[in-house]
Image: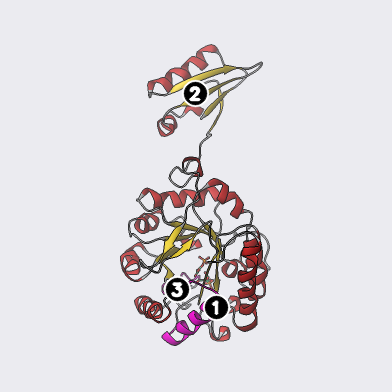
Amino acid sequence: MVVVMSPEATEEDIARVVSRVEGVGGEAFVSRGMSRTIIGLVGDIESFHHLNLRTLGGVADVHRISDPFKLVSRQHHAQRSTVWVGQPGRQVPVGPDSFTLIAGPCAVESPEQTVEAARMAQSAGATILRGGAFKPRTSPYAFQGLGERGLEILASVREATGMPFVTEVVDSRDVELVASHADMLQIGTRHMANFGLLQAVGEAGKPVLLKRGMSATIEEWLMAAEYIAQRGLLDIVLCESGIRTFEPSTRNTLDLSSVPVVQATTHLPIIVDPSHSAGRKDLVVPLASGAIGVGADGIVVDVHPKPELALCDGPQALDGTELRDLAKAVRRLPPVLGRVSA
Ligand code: E4P
Ligand code: PEP
């Protein structure tokens, strides 16, 4: 942490900062410039926060140098992590040495629809199935998902296909139930800042797919990951799902720049969801290709055997031709970019 003194700061002001810092066991290194003095602090950053140094006389500014998130930061964990999803013996990696395609229906609607979507996903190269049993909907009148029945369907499709599955949990009261079925728990964009839910999934013992809140900065998103990590779980995969902007032609604007930023900042893997960010199937393959291009560790996409009948997000679900194009991109691009296809 660095304290910048104002040009008018007196020697007493400087001495007060030094003594407060030393009072909580820290060290203060004073560096006098032509017009300003800066003081570098070494020690426990949280105890410095409690000092409210900005309120002291002569202090112009206080800057944090280290990341506010610790457990997920690359500053203390230079090697990028791989998260393994699924039961022992048939686990799927998500991380820097692979490219993982996760695909499936937005919502689980029936056993037939889910197994068909899973087979489509598998034929396109997907190794993890996605599917919502608890759906976060804008309208309380919209389809809310099949709940526990949806989890049972996903579990039976896992048996049929061998694909581990990720599914969303929207309420901390359901975490235990969802974790008892799922291979990976998803926190959606609408719940990224639901701190009680983050803590609950951090204790559930299953890997977590943490989407970026649609209005969250990257730092807020990584602080959300820190909530999970603090509960002892580091098997977290981040998912860029777009952010709210003034542009109405897509649901959210896909912020592909977050991928390299996140990879430089945290050791956690990051994947991209072109389906939920665009909300339109015609953009899924171009955005997926872009995600592969910027070095994402995987993508998650919606597929549906009959998008026109989907109970949730039909306009973004792939079938037929687009799915074949997606499969082609996922097969060809990662190896060209130096990644081994999962
Ligand atoms: C939910 O799964 C969807 O992806 C999205 O959040 C649905 O939004 P809506 O309820 O506004 O249709
Ligand atoms: C989803 O993946 O089912 C979902 C609801 O996504 P998001 O949180 O990005 O809206």
Vertical order, 325 against 11 (above or below): below
Residue at mark 2: C-beta within 8 A of ligand 2: no
Query: Please, what is the three-letter code of the amino acid marked with disc 1?
Result: Val
- For disc 3, the marked residue is 132
Q: Residue at x 58, y 77 (%)?
A: 317
Q: What is the spatial separation of the Cα atoms under label 3 and label 2, in whole angstroms?
A: 51 Å
Camera-side residue of 141 and 147: 147
- For disc 1, the marked residue is 303
Q: Which of the numbered marks, if any, corresponds to residue 233?
A: none
Instruction: Using a 10 Å C-alpha cutoff, classify the residue at mark 2 as few (fewer than 14 neighbours), some (14 to 19) or many (20 or more).
Output: some
Relative image position of residue 218 (x, y in whole percent) = 55, 50
Figure quadrant of residue 250: bottom right
Camera-side residue of 254 and 13: 254
Relative image position of residue 302 (x, y in whole percent) = 55, 74
Q: Which residues are magenta?
A: 110-138
Relative image position of residue 251 (x, y in whole percent) = 61, 67
- For disc 2, the marked residue is 56
Residue at mark 3: C-beta within 8 A of ligand 2: yes
